[in-house]
Structure formats: structure tokens, C-alpha cells
Image (cartoon, rainbow, N blue to C red):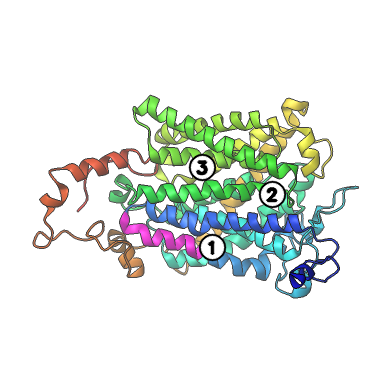
């Protein structure tokens, strides 16, 4: 016991005077929760929400994005997003690998604003590097959802580090690291713009350049395991406590408010989406419920620690209805939306919901909570006397994020396309995982395998049409994610 007590003595170098053990413990916990959202949360969700011939490829794209992001992040990315100012929208590149840098007190040098000193959390720089890495990684994993089922894995391997360096770091520095939008007073509490609007817009842009899935896949793309999909979605929901609860960089009042508001908005949005499915389609959709959960989590993110809980309920209602409308109604009326094959509807669930949350935060953010979290004095939502000024700032910030992501994502993919095809060839798309990786998720006959009447008893397997009915029902519930028909593919 004496040794244990000595290890925590404040005078030891391992516990410097500036270190707050509670803040450090919570920030590491929050980082782990956000990491679990990607690994295994989205890996499981992606591997189960697609048809089974794409299960391995979809899970691997998420896995690779997570791993590749970490090395890029510690080599140059972190300091480009949170280091000293190089340009109004970009920090100076530098490594985050040395002991001298990582064990010192965390600091965001470009965040000093007027008389307000720069942000200096009460824990080591290593903790901040890890926490912000998890945000960078999940942004790329979310983006992957737009191009599942056809992107050349080699092109994806080249795309992930380039996009993190030239797109993500710009948004992160501009809004969080002390860039021009940060100092102007654009509010993005925990990533509604930096993460969700960016991933949704970049994913939609990538889907345009990569091209669509096979026609047969777009018409029938039923999940291979809905129960695992729910499990992956559940990990996302629970992990969001770290996503929004860790944004204040401290275990403080804003963190508590943020975690409560996050759960309230998610639940409200899920119920709203489900009710709309019942009203218009007569049945509650499990896939739709997961999408509603997601939009509720995304929408609250820009203002989770800045709005009252009644406002979180209101944001949940909007989160469950506006993206539902854009996905289920507007999508079918727009030639552009119908043309671009956004596999998991990331544009609707993240770009639309993230923009919506940013605008609602401009209306509903309270001056008291903003005073805790923002160095810019006098910020307040329109409902608290801020007028249209804050909403205008939110729109301008969103416009910058959208324009940058469209331009940079396009340039990166066009450059990669000169070296390696962005889309797998059709003969490989017919097969799926076995063609891309030489591996399959399930030891069962199914999608991608040519039917051989000498080996497969179709009548017994289909059971007089029962399988087609079940798959058709699942397809109809894909809620805008590319599934339309009810035919069975051999």
C-alpha cells in the first residue's frame, strides 16, 4: 500500500502540479469511448449492414482507415490541426512523437483570443493527441460509408492519409485549433461541422467520382445481419458519451450537460423517425430506427454542451424528421441525389444532420454555457438575444466546410485516379469479398457465387419463395440506402 500511495504522490514527476487526475482520467476514458465507436462499432455496423458478399471489404475499409490515420496523425497531422498557426485555416506541421513534447502540459497555442489565454487542459499533451486522433479516425470511417461496395481498396488505401492531411486538418484547425472560424465565433462544440458535415459532403463527393455499385447491388442491398447492425449502432450510441462528453477537455459542468443532452436527442430522434416510418409505411423499420438514432446523435453534437435539455428534445425532433424527409422524399425527386450512389446515405445522416445541428445551435445556445466553452465574448443563440448574427456565422462556417471538402476531395481522387482505378472492375464487383481479399465472411452459399444447379438445391433453400419475401422486405426497409427491389439475385 505504501508503494501504491507513493506512486500517486503529487510531488513526484509523474504527477506534476498542473495535472488534474480527474480530468486526465475522464479524457482518456472519453478517448477510449470514441475509439470504440470506430473499433469495433462501425467495423461491426459496416460489416453487417451490407449484403454478405461485401461484409469483409466493408469492415476492412473501416479497420484500415482507423489504423492508417494514427500514424499520419502523430507524424504530422495533430500539429497541423492543433499546433501553431501557419495560415488562418491551417497549423504548422510537426511530429507528436517525442517525450519532451508529449509529457508536457497540453496546449493549443493558436487559441489565445484577446485577453483570453490559450486553451491549456490540465493533463499531458499525449492525452490530447490521443483524444483528437479518435475524432480524426472516425471522420474517415464515416466517410467510407458512402463508397462501400465498389471502391478499389488500393485507391482507398491511398485516399485515407491524403484526405486526413489536406481536408480534415483544415476543418479542425479552422474551427477548433485557433483558426479564423474559431476566432470569429462559429460554434462547433464537438464536431457537427468538423466531423459530420465534412464526412457527409466528402463522402458524397467521393461517391460521385468513384461511380456507382452494380445495378443489381443498388436494387438489392439487404443487410446480412440486422442483429449485428443493431449491436454496432449500440456501440456508437454509448460511445457518444465520450464523443460529446470529452469536448470540454475537462470533467466539468459542460461535460455533464453534453452527455445528458446527447442521449435525450438520440432517443427523441429515433422515436420520431420510427413514428414517421409507421405513419407513411405502416411498419417500424429497424434500419430506420438506427438511422434515426444516428441523426439524433449527429444533430446534437454541434451544441451538446451549449443548449438546455428541452432544446435537446427539440433538436431530436428535427433530427428525426428533416433527414427523414431529405432521404425518403427529396432524394427520390432530385436527379443529382439519385445519380450519386451514396451507399449508406451518409449525406443525409451526417451532412444534413450536422448542418441542421449547427444552425439549431445558432438559435438555441445559451450565453451561460457559451461563456464556459468559448473564448469569444458575447456569443449567444438567436433565442437569447443573439439575433440573426450567430445563425449567419453558422451558415458561413458551413459554407467554408462544404466548399473545402468538395474541392479537396475531388482533387485527391482525381490525382489517385491517374495512378490506380477508383472503382473495382465489374467482374470483381460481381464476386465481392473473394475478389477483393480472397476471403469471405460466411461459409455459406450466397451473393457473388454463380448458381450451379448440380450443387445448389434452390427450391429447398428458397422454400417456395419465403427467402425472396424476407429479403425483399429487408430491401424495402433500407430507407434510401440504395435498396429498391425485391428480386432475388443468383
- From the top left corner, tell me how far across and down residue 75 is, in percent: 66, 71
Residue of label 2: 247
Seen from the viewer's position, the closer of residues 152 and 262 is 262
- From the top left corner, tell me how far across and down residue 262 is, in percent: 60, 40
Q: Is residue 80 magenta?
A: no
Q: Distance between the residues labelled 3 and 2?
A: 19 Å
Task: Provide the secondary structure element on which disc 3 rests.
Answer: helix
State the quadrant of the C terminus: bottom left
User: Where residue 66 is drawn, which disc sits there?
Assistant: 1
Tell me, yes or no, if residue 304 can be seen here. yes
> Tag 2: Cα neighbours inside 10 Å, few (<14), some, or many (≥20)?
many
325 displayed left or right of 164: left
Question: Residue at left 77%, top 67%?
Answer: 5
First-in-chain label (1 vs 3): 1
Residue of label 3: 294
Question: Residue at left 12%, top 43%?
Answer: 464
Amino acid at each position: 500500500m505504501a508503494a501504491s500511495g507513493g506512486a500517486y504522490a503529487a510531488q513526484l514527476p509523474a504527477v506534476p502540479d498542473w495535472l488534474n487526475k480527474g480530468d486526465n482520467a475522464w479524457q482518456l476514458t472519453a478517448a477510449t469511448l470514441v475509439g470504440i465507436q470506430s473499433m469495433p462499432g462501425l467495423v461491426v455496423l459496416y460489416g453487417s449492414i451490407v449484403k454478405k458478399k461485401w461484409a469483409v471489404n466493408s469492415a476492412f475499409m473501416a479497420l484500415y482507415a482507423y489504423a492508417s490515420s494514427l500514424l499520419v496523425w502523430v507524424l504530422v497531422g495533430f500539429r497541423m490541426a492543433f499546433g501553431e498557426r501557419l495560415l488562418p485555416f491551417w497549423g504548422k506541421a510537426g511530429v507528436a512523437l517525442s517525450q519532451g513534447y508529449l509529457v508536457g502540459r497540453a496546449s493549443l497555442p493558436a487559441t489565445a483570443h484577446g485577453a483570453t489565454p490559450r486553451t491549456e487542459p490540465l493533463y499531458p499533451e499525449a492525452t490530447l493527441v490521443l483524444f483528437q486522433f479518435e475524432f480524426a479516425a472516425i471522420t474517415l470511417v464515416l466517410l467510407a460509408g458512402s463508397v462501400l461496395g465498389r471502391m478499389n481498396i488500393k485507391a482507398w488505401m491511398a485516399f485515407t492519409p491524403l484526405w486526413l492531411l489536406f481536408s480534415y486538418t483544415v476543418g479542425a484547425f479552422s474551427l477548433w485549433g485557433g483558426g479564423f472560424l474559431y476566432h470569429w465565433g462559429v460554434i462547433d462544440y464537438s464536431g457537427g461541422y468538423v466531423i459530420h458535415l465534412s464526412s457527409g459532403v466528402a463522402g458524397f463527393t467521393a461517391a460521385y467520382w468513384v461511380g456507382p455499385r452494380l445495378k443489381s447491388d443498388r436494387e438489392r442491398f439487404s443487410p446480412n445481419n440486422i442483429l449485428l447492425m443493431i449491436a454496432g449502432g449500440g456501440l456508437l450510441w454509448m460511445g457518444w458519451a465520450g464523443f460529446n462528453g470529452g469536448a470540454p477537455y475537462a470533467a466539468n459542468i459542460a461535460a455533464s450537460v453534453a452527455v445528458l443532452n446527447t442521449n435525450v436527442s438520440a432517443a427523441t430522434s429515433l422515436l420520431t423517425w420510427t413514428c414517421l416510418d409507421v405513419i407513411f409505411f405502416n411498419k417500424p423499420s429497424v434500419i430506420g430506427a438506427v438511422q434515426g438514432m444516428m441523426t439524433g446523435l449527429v444533430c446534437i453534437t454541434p451544441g451538446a454542451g451549449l443548449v438546455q435539455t428541452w432544446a435537446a428534445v427539440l433538436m431530436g425532433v428535427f433530427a428525426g424528421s428533416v433527414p427523414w424527409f431529405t432521404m425518403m422524399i427529396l432524394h427520390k425527386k432530385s436527379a443529382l441525389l439519385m445519380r450519386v450512389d451514396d451507399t449508406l446515405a451518409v449525406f443525409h445522416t451526417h451532412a444534413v444532420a450536422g448542418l441542421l445541428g449547427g444552425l439549431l445551435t445558432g438559435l438555441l445556445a445559451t450565453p451561460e454555457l457559451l461563456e464556459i466553452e468559448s473564448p469569444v465574448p458575447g456569443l449567444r443563440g438567436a433565442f437569447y438575444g443573439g439575433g440573426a448574427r450567430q445563425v449567419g456565422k453558422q451558415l458561413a462556417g458551413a459554407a467554408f466546410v462544404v466548399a473545402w471538402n468538395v474541392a479537396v476531395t475531388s482533387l485527391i481522387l482525381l490525382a489517385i485516379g491517374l495512378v490506380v482505378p477508383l472503382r473495382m472492375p465489374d467482374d470483381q464487383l460481381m464476386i465481392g469479398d473473394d475478389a477483393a481479399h480472397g476471403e469471405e465472411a460466411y461459409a455459406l452459399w450466397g451473393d457473388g457465387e454463380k448458381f450451379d444447379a448440380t450443387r445448389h438445391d434452390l427450391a429447398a433453400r428458397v422454400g417456395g419463395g419465403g427467402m425472396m419475401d424476407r429479403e425483399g422486405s429487408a430491401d424495402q426497409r433500407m430507407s434510401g440506402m440504395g435498396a429498391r427491389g425485391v428480386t432475388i439475385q443468383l
